[in-house]
């Protein structure tokens, strides 16, 4: 399946740190909770995917600011879990992220496919052969 979603908030703004009864806690910020709800509205009712998954993300940023691609995964994958796309993002065995062109407002295109049973073994064999060369 393929989904076009809003660009996720930066990891720095996804969490907030508070002290509750003298204990430090990390919570999802208002921006983070709003992002999760926006993704849930876009996804709509969905049958939860089971099994091992491969996910490809095309990240189209909203502006020219420098962005680390790895900083967006937490908010994006958690939002898809919250929307019920999969039971848990620990089902993902392969995650590929590509930087796309800037688009007004930013977006991410997410392609989700069942993981081929032998894909990881084949990749491991290829990597082993490459290291031996």
Image (tube, rainbow, N blue to C red):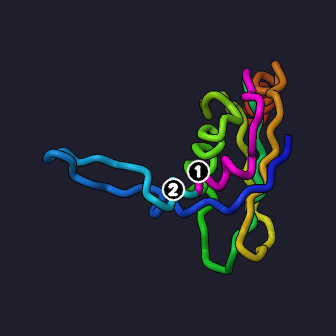
Query: Relative to 85, does residue 107 appear above or below in the rendering?
Result: below
Q: What range is drawn magenta here? A: 35-51
Residue under the image location 83 percent in, 34 percent down: 113
Viewer-nearest residue: 120 or 101: 101
- Report the residue marked by disc 1: 36
Q: At which x and y percent is residue 27?
A: 38, 49
Q: Is residue 13 magenta?
A: no
Q: Which quadrant would the N terminus be assigned to in this image? A: top right
Q: Secondary structure at mark 1?
A: helix
Q: At which x and y percent is residue 72?
A: 60, 56
Viewer-nearest residue: 63 or 82: 82
Viewer-nearest residue: 56 or 109: 109
Residue under the image location 61 percent in, 78 percent down: 65
Q: Are marks 1 and 2 in contact (CB under 8 Å)?
A: yes
- Report the residue marked by disc 2: 32
In the displayed structure image, the side of residue 8 where residue 60 appears, left or right: right
Q: Is residue 42 magenta?
A: yes
């Amino acid at each position: 399946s393929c989904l076009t979603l809003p660009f996720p908030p930066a990891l720095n703004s996804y969490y907030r740190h508070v002290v509750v009864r003298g204990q430090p806690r990390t919570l999802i910020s208002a921006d983070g909770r709003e992002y999760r709800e926006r993704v849930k509205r876009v996804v709509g009712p969905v049958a939860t995917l089971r099994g091992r998954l491969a996910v490809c993300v095309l990240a189209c940023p909203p502006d020219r600011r420098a962005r680390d691609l790895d900083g967006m995964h937490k908010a994006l994958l958690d939002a898809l879990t919250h929307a019920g796309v999969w039971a848990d993002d620990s089902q993902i065995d392969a995650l590929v992220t590509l930087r796309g062109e800037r688009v007004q407002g930013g977006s991410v295109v997410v392609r989700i496919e069942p993981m081929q049973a032998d894909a990881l073994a084949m990749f491991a064999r290829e990597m082993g052969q490459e290291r031996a060369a």
